[in-house]
Image (cartoon, rainbow, N blue to C red):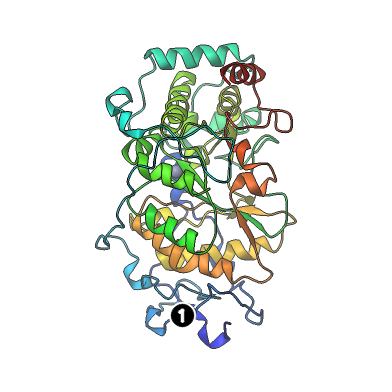
């Protein structure tokens, strides 16, 4: 049981970020996504809170307030949370948990008993994949085949020219062309985009950019709290940490695509987009034995050209909830590591998200990351314990579950084509033939 005396009062030690880079496609992680100045503590001070995972906070966590960011109050924190004063840019690297050893080949996640067994990752040869964190070449036999598959899909790809680096200010024509439906500049979405969970008080939990050295800490917390998440995986990280990716999948988390080298997809040619998505699908299939049916565009950078290519590759885009230009459900946790924002501001962002949750008639999806130590520490120490203590209780589940589809529908090989038709019928037929 939680008492008001145990509330954690936080205040800022860094000034509010200007929104100067909010339109820079290369820095969308830095978007100032909430109007902090207009915010107040949205975790109701009188709301009863009870949770087995809602221990009292330690007063030693209080940072020095400067008055530049409004104080926030959390219903609960993790008793083993890293102090906020230590969740900072240039923080010394904490010891990492031991990475898992490879799971037994043939293992199957208990939540998808019909899944094919996982491959033996000892047979993976990194030399067979593109260089890490670089756009894959578009003239390899694999990419040429995927380009052909897209052409054969029957999906019409709009002929928009790629955008140029620099985001909205650098692309006035694309911004004014509403037929592009460019999310980055104006938040345009299509019905095919997943932007919320349909049921109120349901949180489609997601973490992007891993797997990475601090991911095991997040997985440990999620296991203790009996939570499952969706992980949007970067292909370059998947080939670097295949055993970790298998551990995520076998633990019942949803695995989805987040490109090979994390570019802004609207800046790429069709062929480059196909290479980014195709290689990420392939490495996940090679490590897990299954191919995701969902993707998240890095920085949320998607337009109708990117959407069409995703559709042709049987990938459904998953964004994060956005209810107004100043209320996107982005914690900005990614930017603590680089010193662009503070953990205090991230918690203000989180509380603003909670305030906005109460105003919408759907569930929600929040942008968070497991790439860096700092974002994992704020998630496991503060955001998740606070969410677990929320009243009324949130239903915290992977995106697939929040959509009320079967866990197997997250992958092409286990998708129920009768109840959850994939976008491209031809691929469905091919899958039937493969099985
Ligand atoms: Zn990302």
Q: Quadrant of ligand 1?
A: top left
Name which quarter of the figure residue 260 lies in: top left
Does label 1 point to a residue whose CB lies under 8 Å from ligand 1? no
Q: How many marks?
A: 1
Question: Which residue is more in the foreground, 212 or 298?
Answer: 212
Q: Quadrant of residue 373?
A: bottom left
Q: Quadrant of the N terminus?
A: bottom right
Q: Quadrant of the C terminus?
A: top right
Instruction: Identify the element where label 1 is drawn.
Output: loop
- 46 sits to left or right of 134: right
Question: Residue 385: x percent and y percent?
Answer: 52, 69
Vertical side of 310 occupied by 364: above or below: below
Q: Position of residue 123 (x, y in %)?
A: 32, 28
In this view, the residue farthest toward the left is: 92
**Is 117 placed left or right of 338 in the picture?**
right
Residue 375 appears at what percent x and percent y? Answer: 41, 58
In the depicted structure, whether residue 354 falls above or below residue 401: below
Q: Nearer the viewer, residue 222 or 278?
A: 222
Would you name the residue on which mark 1 appears? 57
Foreground residue, 333 or 201?
A: 201
Q: Position of residue 78 (x, y in %)?
A: 45, 72
């Amino acid at each position: 049981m939680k008492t008001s005396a145990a509330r954690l009062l936080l205040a800022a030690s860094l000034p509010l970020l200007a929104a100067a880079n909010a339109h820079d496609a290369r820095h969308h992680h830095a978007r100032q996504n909430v109007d902090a100045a207009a915010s107040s503590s949205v975790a109701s001070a009188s709301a009863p809170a009870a949770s087995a995972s809602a221990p009292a906070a330690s007063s030693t966590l209080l940072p020095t307030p400067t008055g530049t960011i409004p104080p926030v109050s959390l219903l609960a924190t993790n008793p083993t949370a890293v102090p906020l004063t230590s969740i900072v840019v240039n923080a010394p690297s904490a010891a990492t948990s031991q990475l898992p050893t490879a799971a037994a080949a043939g293992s199957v996640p208990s939540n998808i008993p019909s899944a094919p067994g996982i491959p033996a990752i000892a047979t993976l040869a990194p030399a067979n994949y593109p260089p890490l964190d670089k756009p894959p070449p578009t003239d390899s036999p694999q990419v040429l085949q995927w380009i052909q598959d897209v052409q054969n899909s029957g999906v019409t790809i709009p002929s928009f020219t790629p955008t140029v680096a620099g985001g909205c200010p650098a692309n006035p024509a694309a911004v004014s062309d509403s037929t592009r439906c460019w999310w980055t500049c104006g938040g345009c979405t299509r019905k095919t985009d997943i932007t919320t969970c349909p049921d109120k008080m349901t949180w489609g939990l997601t973490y992007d950019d891993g797997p990475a050295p601090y991911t095991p800490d997040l997985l440990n917390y999620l296991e203790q709290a009996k939570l499952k998440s969706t992980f949007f995986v970067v292909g370059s990280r998947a080939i670097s940490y295949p055993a970790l990716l298998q551990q995520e999948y076998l633990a019942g988390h949803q695995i989805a695509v987040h490109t090979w080298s994390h570019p802004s997809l609207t800046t790429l040619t069709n062929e480059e987009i196909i290479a980014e998505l195709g290689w990420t699908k392939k490495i996940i299939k090679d490590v897990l034995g299954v191919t995701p049916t969902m993707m998240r565009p890095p920085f949320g950078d998607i337009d109708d050209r990117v959407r069409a290519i995703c559709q042709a590759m049987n990938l459904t885009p998953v964004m994060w909830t956005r209810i107004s230009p100043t209320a996107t459900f982005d914690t900005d946790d990614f930017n603590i590591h680089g010193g662009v924002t503070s953990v205090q501001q991230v918690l203000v962002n989180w509380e603003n998200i909670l305030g906005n949750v109460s105003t919408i008639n759907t569930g929600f999806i929040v942008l968070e990351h497991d790439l860096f130590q700092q974002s994992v520490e704020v998630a496991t120490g503060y955001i998740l314990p606070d969410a677990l203590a929320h009243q009324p209780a949130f239903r915290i589940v992977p995106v697939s579950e929040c959509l009320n589809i079967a866990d197997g529908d997250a992958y092409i090989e286990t998708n129920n084509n009768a109840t959850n038709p994939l976008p491209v019928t031809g691929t469905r037929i091919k899958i039937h033939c493969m099985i």
